[in-house]
Amino acid sequence: MTERRSGIDRRSVLRSIGAGTLGAAGATVASGPATADENESHYHNPVGPIGFGDVSIIHADDGTYYAYGTETPYDIVPIARCDDMVSWEYFTQALQSYPDWRDNEDAGIWAPDVNYYDGQYHLYYSYSTWGSQNNPGIGLATADSPEGPFEDQGPVFRGEDLGMTNCIDGDFRVVDGTPYMVWGSWYGIHGVELTEAADDYVEGTEFHLAGDMREGPMTIRENGYYYLFYSTGHCCDGYDSTYEVEVGRAEEFTGPYYNQNGTDLRELNEHRSGVAVLSGTDRFTGPGHNGAIQDENDDWWMLYHVEATEADETRYMMLDRIRWDEDDWPVIGCNGHPSAESPVPGADSYDCDGEHFETSLSTGTPTATAGDESGETPEPTVSAASPTTTAESGTPADESTETTGSTAETTTTSATGDGMSVLATVAALGGTAAGALARRDTGDGDGDRGGEGD
């Protein structure tokens, strides 16, 4: 079983945070249900609950959505559920103990990727530590129900198996009946064919999709193309994070993938050197590590996390529509920035000029659009009044991803939260810094660790 810290029951803490509990000091940041009004036609970002970094989601046969996140001090892969992609409530944890195939007691479980495959729920996860190259890997746990319990099946592959480093941030896909895993953080985005049982890799089938300084890959099929979304920039630095999402597309799943400027993604090896489709604002810093899922109208929605809000230097889960421009390139929300308010998934219409859409973009902030030919991306803006706290630094990233199982159930991933102030979170959870739920209090960190995740 996972430990309890400071004598506080983890479920009580997460549920109270999800309800927007006020701390004794500091104002709360509203999130999800905490800011929702009685009008069910729209929602407000962030969507909760707290403690769901690198979120992956799936839509079960009974209509329930399940979200799975990177570990917290209280859960090894927490699970939340809802029936609308918006009103998330903490439920339980997917794993009851840490898998035994790592020889490092500081290794953490990051970036879950959930799928329905071959009659079972497959939960892929990264097993790594911050700042090392000690043979990280992607493991598999399975269950008969999305609610678990999930039983660990061991590693699918590790870095030394493939002669590569930073084998984390997995994205499972089935293409023409063949299972694949796409993964990568900092040292390129890669793919490999899996065995029919999807619990092992097929030797000699590796392929290269994108260059260095990128992570958290996620692929979808739309408009006759395969789209590869990934995050670039630095995660996990609170208000100093520069995380954002870029994209490329290909006619074949194995590539090559090109961006809006016609650049082969394998040639991009610097941070933020592609074309951004989602970047931060002064209200929401460092959006990234996204996943995607389709609503009842078959419209795509992106779930992702931000590294901080204007009031709280903690990760939060966000949700925005993926729209398509006239050249079939994705536009996130209405302007390539997080929305503050949006029509709900499945709504009859999505009007960027309507009363139920509000951008988080301040007047004068550069707008990243899918058709930008410059290839440049605006720097995230940080409010001068924003509080500051100690944060991990040094490498890009976080981890999560989307996936589609063979039975049309779709997964996603993103980030953390519901409304609780930094001070209240620290007071309640005994964290060593604001954002403790998004970064392991052992100092291992969570997320990209680009070049630093082991």
Image (spheres, rainbow, N blue to C red):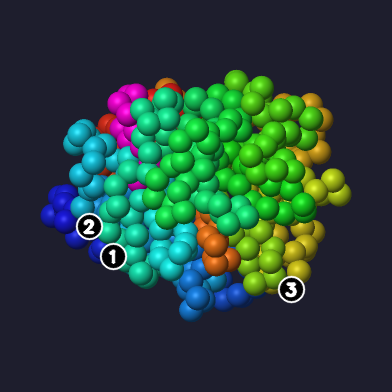
- Relative to 84, does residue 428 appear above or below in the rendering? above
Q: Within the image, what quadrant is residue 256 found in?
A: top right
Residue 315 lies, in percent from the top left, at 44, 45
- Is residue 183 something that shows in the picture? yes
Per the model, the C-alpha gap separating discs 1 and 2 is 8 Å
Left or right: 373 as drawn, with respect to 118 = right
Residue 348 bears which disc, if any? Answer: 3
**Is 137 contained in the magenta span?**
yes
Cβ atoms at labels 2 and 3 below 8 Å apart: no
Coordinates of residue 387 in the picture (x, y in percent): 43, 36
Would residue 50 be seen by someone viewing this image from the given angle? no
Q: Which kind of residue does numbered mark 1 sit on?
A: Pro
Q: Locate residue 295 relative to residue 18 in the image: left or right.
A: right
Segment tinted magenta in the rendering = 128-139
Can you tell which mark lies on residue 96?
A: 2
- The amino acid marked with disc number 2 is Gln
**Element carrying mark 2:** loop
Query: Foreground residue, 140 or 31?
Result: 140
Q: Which residue is mark 1?
A: 149
Residue 24 higher or lower than 255, as above or below: below
Please say if the residues under marks 1 and 2 sit with CB atoms less than 8 Å apart: yes
Disc 3 residue type? Asp
